[in-house]
Image (tube, rainbow, N blue to C red):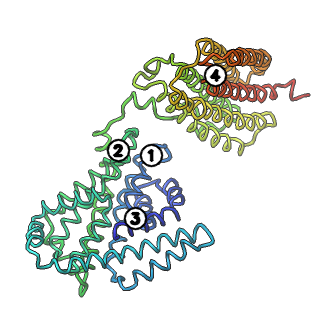
């Protein structure tokens, strides 16, 4: 009940403010000091340092922030997580069910999403204290139970306590929950302050498990976030482990008259604040150490989305800025061409075992990787163009800038057709356990070859907004539609003549054709946009 209460409270707070916290972290991590405050505030709001770590890993993976920017946030998150322990130390058990009932009322009857989310958080808060009450009552008879006393006696060894704290926190994936359990044990006089501190040390290391799991399969920059948290927490525990007696005296001195649960909560806060203050000036050195332990991999760097041409310093003159955008968009079209090259062979069963440029990736994996690049580049190009149109542009340059905004959206849509629609048909094909007919494959390959030629023409046209190349593509529209009608007629002829494979794969065949038709129409839309910018068309 206690663990479910913490989980529910955290879920409610994440729904209430998760996206705002994500935006805040993206905007305010320019230096380690602001990162510290952002991390502490975000964790206090979300009530979960694990959630913040997962968010940091995803932000670095998406290249919305850099690894070095978020190291300060990690320290802040460790401070923020102590807020939950301070709440738990309050004796609110008598009001637990009242809080739960009020929260449930808001969640079920709230008129707005915000009210329902507040209700979920408050209901979780009530469950948390109700769970603590249940644990406390259950623990009361065990105070004189010999096996438990023997087990608790073992916890007087700091190393064993750290190991226990690490393992339990890793299992329940919440240091706040484990600190709450420690406080419950202290309420029953089963645990001393001296034994509680190393348990909390272990929980600080154990909480790293969530970030480590979240970083599996990510780029090295994202994995460094988890590694930095592990290094910081492990090193601080090794250092402070030798100062437990002094820490006990300091906590008692700073908490005169406080009961044991409050002293434990204060010890948790004091430790994390001191750790943050100790490591804050050392963060540049920590960043270098993590980079040394997990250096960049040149092969992996090629997989990470990145701009090649756009530079904020190159917004003037506007003609140069637009030239850089065209170069980046021509590169995007090249990437789309490689996605196209891989998708149809994957559907016809003729794809090679690995991608021609990235041998460690299968053709399907390479398409997903390139789609991520397209999405990344679309956002960066659009952002750059918005900055460009804020400059003093001529009428011709303004028209071109807005045309490029339109084209880059279309390029992103082509990537979606390839990844979502066409590649998604692989699932349908596997479910059928049948292949297209040989004739059908040849006909689809013919359409595919035409689309690849269109892509090549557009790539060249985009570099200089060449209206002549765009007109050449538009001149081939009738040829494409004749080819498409011919392919469809031949396929339907086989279906009518009851060719078994054609009848069973009819839906798949038509979906592939529809996907290729959509890509052609998008290509034609790009070509028309380029052609409309030519001086002859402008004068008309």
Q: Residue furthest bottom?
A: 257
The numbered disc on residue 224 is 2
Alpha carbon separation for disc pair 4 and 2: 52 Å
* Residue 455 picture quarter: top right
Label 3 element class: helix
Residue at 69%, 34% in the rendered image: 410
Of the numbered discs 3 and 4, the one sitting upstream in the chain is 3
Image position, residue 537 (x, y; %):
86, 26
Q: Position of residue 129 (x, y in %)?
A: 36, 77
**Residue annotated with mark 1:** 60
- Disc nearest the viewer among 3 and 2: 3
Q: CA distance from mark 1 to mark 2?
A: 9 Å
Instruction: Using a 10 Å C-alpha cutoff, classify the residue at mark 4 as few (fewer than 14 neighbours), some (14 to 19) or many (20 or more).
Output: some
Left or right of residue 258, residue 225 in this image: right
Whether 423 is drawn above or below 445: the answer is below
Mark pair 4, 1: CA separation: 48 Å
* Marks 3 and 2 close (CB-CB < 8 Å): no
Please tell me in which quadrant of the rendered image residue 511 appears: top right
- Which mark is drawn over residue 7? 3
**Picture residue at 28% right of the left edge, 62% below the top:** 275
Residue at mark 4: 503
């Amino acid at each position: 009940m206690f663990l479910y209460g913490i989980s529910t409270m955290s879920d409610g707070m994440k729904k209430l403010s998760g996206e705002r916290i994500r935006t805040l972290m993206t905007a305010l991590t320019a230096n380690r000091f602001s990162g510290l405050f952002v991390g502490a505030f975000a964790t206090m709001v979300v009530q979960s340092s694990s959630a913040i770590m997962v968010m940091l890993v995803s932000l670095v993976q998406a290249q919305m922030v850099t690894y070095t920017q978020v190291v300060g946030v990690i320290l802040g998150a460790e401070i923020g997580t102590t807020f939950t322990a301070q709440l738990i130390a309050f004796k609110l058990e008598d009001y637990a069910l009242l809080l739960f009932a009020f929260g449930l009322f808001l969640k079920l009857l709230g008129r707005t999403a915000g009210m329902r989310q507040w209700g979920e958080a408050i209901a979780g808060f009530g469950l948390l204290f109700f769970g603590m009450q249940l644990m406390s009552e259950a623990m009361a008879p065990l105070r004189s139970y010999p096996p438990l006393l023997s087990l608790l006696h073992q916890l007087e060894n700091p190393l064993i306590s750290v190991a226990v704290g690490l393992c339990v926190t890793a299992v329940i994936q919440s240091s706040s929950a484990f600190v709450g359990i420690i406080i419950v044990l202290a309420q029953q006089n089963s645990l001393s302050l001296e034994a509680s501190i190393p348990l909390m040390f272990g929980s600080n290391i154990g909480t790293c498990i969530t970030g480590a799991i979240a970083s599996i399969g990510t780029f090295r920059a994202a994995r460094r976030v988890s590694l930095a948290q592990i290094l910081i927490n492990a090193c601080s525990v090794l250092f402070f482990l030798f100062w437990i007696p002094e820490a006990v005296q300091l906590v008692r001195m700073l908490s005169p008259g406080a009961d044991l649960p409050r002293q434990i909560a204060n010890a948790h806060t004091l430790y994390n604040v001191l750790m943050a203050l100790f490591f804050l000036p050392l963060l540049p050195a920590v960043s270098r150490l993590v980079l040394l332990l997990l250096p960049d991999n040149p092969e992996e760097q090629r997989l990470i989305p990145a701009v090649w041409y756009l530079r904020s310093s190159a917004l003037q003159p506007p003609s140069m800025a637009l030239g850089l955008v065209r170069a980046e968009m021509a590169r995007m079209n090249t990437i789309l061409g490689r996605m196209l090259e891989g998708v149809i062979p994957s559907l016809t069963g003729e794809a090679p075992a690995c991608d021609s440029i990235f041998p460690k990736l299968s053709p399907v994996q390479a398409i997903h990787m390139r789609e991520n690049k397209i999405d990344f580049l679309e956002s960066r190009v659009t952002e750059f163009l918005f900055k460009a149109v804020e400059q003093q542009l001529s009428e011709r340059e303004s028209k071109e800038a807005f045309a490029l905004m339109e084209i880059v959206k279309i390029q992103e849509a082509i990537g979606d057709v390839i990844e979502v629609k066409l590649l998604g048909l692989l699932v349908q094909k596997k479910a059928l356990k049948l292949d297209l007919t040989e004739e059908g494959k040849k006909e689809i390959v013919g359409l595919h070859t035409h689309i690849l030629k269109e892509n090549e023409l557009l790539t060249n046209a985009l570099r200089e907004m060449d209206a002549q190349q765009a007109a050449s593509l538009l001149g081939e529209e009738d040829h494409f539609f004749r080819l498409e009608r011919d392919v469809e007629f031949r396929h339907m002829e086989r279906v009518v003549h009851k060719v078994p494979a054609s009848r069973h794969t009819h839906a798949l065949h038509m979906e592939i054709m529809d996907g290729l038709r959509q890509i052609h129409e998008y290509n034609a839309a790009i070509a028309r946009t380029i052609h409309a910018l030519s001086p002859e068309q402008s004068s008309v």
